[in-house]
Image (spheres, rainbow, N blue to C red):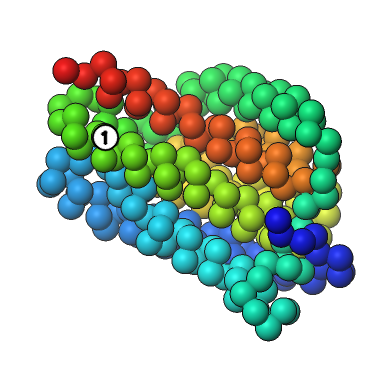
Amino acid sequence: MIEENTLEIEQHSVLKSLVLHLLPGMLIGMFYFAFYARFAKHGYPSIMALAVAVPVVLVPVELGYLLVQGYKKNKKLSLKQVISYLQPIKTWEYFVWIPILFGIIGIIFTQMKPVDQFMQSHVFSWMPTMQSGLEGGYAKPILIRTYLMVIVFVVCIGPIVEELYFRGYLLPRMKYAGKFAPLLHSFLFALYHVFTPWMILTRTIGLLPLIYTVKKKNLYVGIGLHILMNSVDMLTGVLFITKMV
């Protein structure tokens, strides 16, 4: 378990905060847009490019940055004094709050679907839609390999690293935004997802419950919730594959 930071947290300037929030997303987006067509040539849906971007870009950039900060403080590869919001809560609280927050996020995302569709068709129609592989026309072995990658990297590893980086590291260093820090942070996290910009408004509002981490000072709630959120599309994909001939 990562030890809680017991020292006063150094704060970021507005510029540094913006760069650290958005640069990883830009790099992930560059990889995705550079390679999704190449994966398509080999019969893979574009979500495969996103899954590969996690170990190739997301983990080295975000976790790598955190480890560098930890090395500066501890003279070894450690996240001690780097990550915040690690105070323990009672076990039963995880089984209560994660489902409740998941339900709230699900309702928000469902209600905001018309907004996403409008934004995608009227504002971002020039951008390619991410293919999940469930549109048909993909071979079963291709989808099996794709969703194995999705399970490992998009559902599990990606959310863990993102929660450490965004909620555990960046959010506590946004005192410059005052009481609006959670909202600004949620907006910047939405912008970070450059491959689906039509969901900026939905993600800004819908992911605010992740800021529950701030209230409970417990990052593990956010990690569990983030993994559960990313599992929805994965489960749909697995069910789709199992029904294929």
Instruction: List the residue tagged with mark 1.
Output: 144
Question: Which residue is more in the foreground, 148 or 219?
Answer: 148
Residue 71 in which image quadrant: bottom right
Residue 211 position (above or below residue 68) = above
Residue 87 position (above or below residue 129) = below
The quadrant in which the N terminus is found is bottom right
Q: In this image, 178 relative to 112: left or right?
A: right
**Amino acid marked by disc 1:** Ile
Q: In this image, 26 relative to 190: left or right?
A: left
Does any portion of residue 183 appear in the rendered image? no
Residue 115 position (above or below residue 29) = above
Q: In this image, 199 relative to 44: left or right?
A: right
Q: In this image, 211 relative to 34: left or right?
A: right
The quadrant in which the C terminus is found is top left
For the point 50% across and 44% down, which residue is it? 156
Residue 139's spot in the image, x, y percent?
A: 15, 31
* Label 1, residues with CA under 10 Å away: few <14, some 14-19, many ≥20: some
Residue 98's spot in the image, x, y percent?
A: 69, 30
Question: Which residue is more in the foreground, 199 or 79?
Answer: 79
Residue 116's spot in the image, x, y percent?
A: 47, 29
For the point 68% across and 83% down, which residue is it? 75
Residue 210's spot in the image, x, y percent?
A: 68, 39
Does any portion of residue 115 appear in the rendered image? yes
For the point 86% across and 65% down, which residue is it? 6
